Image (cartoon, rainbow, N blue to C red):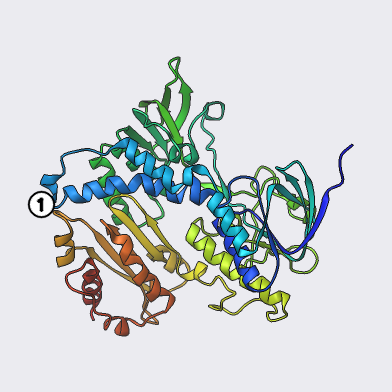
């Protein structure tokens, strides 16, 4: 006989205890509400164990080594290659060896309840949870249910691929050994970063992409990253399809490419994008269904409230689950806004859509999303590209130049970089910025502040960069613009 589910009631139920879910729960608890996190895997989520942290831990040692090799004096002292075992051990440290004890402790100390198990909606404000403790739970939310379930990899329709045991990004970032030959399918951020990481750890890497490398970034910036990959021995097949993948008798793989060539590899990493992880959440029970053959997508207002939910406003989606921006930092921003909005609505302090740029609104999603590709050289961007700005109806201009300032010359020999500002000519404010080059990620927050604050260019002219730093490129860009 199946036991009756244990019935529990909370102000807010958060489905997914990754970084985004944790932030939602934290904010609603700070707002005086009760919250429960429902998580089927590790508390801390993809970023902590299989994405942001382990991938950057794999990348950083190679970047540090190359940085030393690019400076006379330091270069002569560097006589060794990367210690692979030490790099993997450091990666394990940053993933807490795939144990979530410290994250669970934080949840408990914050006053959030945790139920481990798979949860799905059965009615508005109601979830069923198959607990990992063997119990079944029926949870009811007084105010809100928040979907913070992250995303799942896309599987490209390549002949033979679905039948093979290949790597996704999870398997790559948690690898215990470095394959002699690695084939990477996909030229986006994750594929590009991991291609370079494994090349510097000793793999012979081949990257295959259907379009150009890092296609959503300005071509001039992407070309610098491509040059960096080639310098590390990565073989690039760009604007090239993969027609089939097959496994050989010795356990290796053969890729047949659209240009007629073939690639043999010991491991194949598929990194061709992600989509919101909304399958199996019972959304059809509350009126949401995916189009035939298409993944389900939700639309939300600026506070994360899902459009079209039945009954009173109660269903929210944040982070990758909302499908807007697949960045951990942006997901946590959405979570903070949604959590504050939920608490305010529960108290009767917020009615209708929140005002732009208020603490309840995710306004930066439309204007100022920052992102970094942590390759060597780095690529950092915020806001709109020229093409996006024109599409959005702005009267736009751009200014761009190589990064050639005293700070870059001191940084390393033969420093190569590129910078661009995208300008709204009507208001004379920045709409976007891009930097490419070694260590340019640290330039990005100044640009983010300028875009969010809509700082007039004639005022930005008075933000004097310290000498000699790479930030002096700001002065050169404004001078080229005519200030």
- Identity of the residue drawn at 24% across and 69% down: 471
Q: Quadrant of the C terminus?
A: bottom left
* Residue projecting furthest to the right: 1
Left or right: residue 241 compared with residue 463: right
**Which x, y percent locates residue 51?**
47, 47
Seen in the picture, residue 342 relative to 196 is either above or below; the reply is: below
Q: Going by the image, does 8 lie left or right of 107?
A: right
Q: Looking at this view, name the residue that lies furthest to the top.
A: 249
Towards the viewer: 310 or 467: 467
397, 372: nearer the viewer? 372
Q: Is 460 located above or below residue 112 in the figure? A: below
Q: Badge 1: few (under 14), some or many (20 or more) residues near its Cα, within 10 Å?
A: few
Q: Residue at x 49, y 51 (%)?
A: 47
Q: Which residue is rendered at x = 21% and y = 63% of the image?
A: 403
Task: From the top left corner, tell me how far across and down residue 274 is, in percent.
Answer: 53, 47
Judging depth in this view, the residue of 438 and 13 nearest the camera is 13
* 471 versus 5 height, above or below: below
Residue at the image position 49 percent from the left and 40 percent from the top: 170
- Quarter placement of the N terminus: top right
Image location (x, y in percent) of residue 263: 37, 27
Front-lying residue, 183 or 31: 31
Q: Which residue is mark 1?
A: 72
Q: Quadrant of residue 177?
A: top left
Helix, strand or loop at label 1? It is loop
Q: Position of residue 165 (x, y in %)?
A: 52, 28
As drawn, is 152 to the left or to the right of 37?
Answer: left
């Amino acid at each position: 006989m199946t036991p009756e589910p244990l019935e529990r009631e909370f102000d807010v139920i958060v489905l997914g205890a990754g970084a985004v879910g944790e932030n939602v729960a934290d904010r609603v608890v700070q707002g005086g509400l009760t919250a429960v996190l429902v998580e089927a895997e590790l508390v801390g989520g993809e970023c902590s164990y299989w994405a942001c942290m382990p991938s950057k831990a794999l990348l950083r040692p190679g970047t540090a080594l190359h940085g030393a090799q690019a400076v006379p004096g330091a270069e002569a002292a560097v006589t060794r290659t990367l210690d692979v075992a030490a790099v993997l051990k450091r990666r394990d440290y940053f993933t807490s060896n795939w144990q979530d004890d410290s994250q669970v402790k934080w949840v408990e100390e914050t006053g959030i309840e945790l139920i481990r198990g798979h949860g799905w909606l059965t009615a508005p404000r109601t979830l069923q949870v198959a607990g990992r403790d063997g119990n079944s739970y029926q949870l009811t939310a007084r105010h809100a249910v928040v979907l913070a379930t992250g995303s799942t990899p896309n599987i490209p329709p390549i002949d033979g691929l679905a039948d093979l045991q290949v790597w996704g990004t999870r398997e790559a970032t948690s690898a215990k050994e470095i394959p002699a030959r690695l084939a990477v399918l996909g030229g986006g951020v994750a594929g590009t970063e991991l291609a370079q990481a494994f090349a510097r750890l000793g793999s012979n890497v081949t990257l295959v992409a259907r379009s150009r490398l890092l296609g959503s970034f300005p071509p001039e910036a992407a070309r610098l990253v491509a040059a960096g990959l080639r310098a590390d021995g990565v073989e690039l097949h760009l604007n090239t399809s993969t027609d089939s993948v097959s496994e050989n008798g010795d356990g290796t793989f053969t890729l047949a490419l659209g240009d007629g060539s073939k690639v043999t590899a010991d491991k194949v990493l598929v990194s061709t994008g992600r989509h919101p992880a909304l399958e199996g959440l019972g959304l059809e029970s509350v009126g949401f269904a995916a189009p035939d053959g298409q993944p389900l997508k939700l639309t939300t207002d600026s506070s994360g409230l899902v459009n079209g939910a039945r009954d009173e406003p109660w269903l929210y989606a944040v982070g990758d689950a909302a499908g807007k921006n697949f960045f951990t930092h942006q997901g946590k921003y959405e979570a903070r806004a949604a959590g504050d909005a939920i608490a305010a609505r529960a108290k009767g302090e917020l009615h209708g859509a929140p005002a732009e740029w208020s603490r309840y609104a995710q306004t930066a999603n439309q204007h100022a999303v920052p992102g970094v590709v942590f390759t060597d050289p780095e690529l950092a961007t915020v806001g709109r590209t020229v093409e996006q700005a024109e599409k959005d109806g702005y009267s736009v201009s751009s200014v761009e130049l190589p990064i050639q300032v005293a700070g870059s010359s001191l940084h390393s020999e033969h420093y190569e970089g590129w910078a661009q500002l995208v300008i709204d000519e009507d208001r004379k404010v920045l709409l976007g910025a891009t930097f490419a080059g070694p260590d340019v990620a640290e330039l990005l927050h100044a640009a983010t502040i300028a875009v969010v604050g809509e700082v007039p260019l004639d005022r930005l002219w008075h933000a004097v960069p310290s000498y000699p730093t790479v930030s002096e490129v700001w002065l050169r860009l404004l001078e080229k613009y005519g200030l």
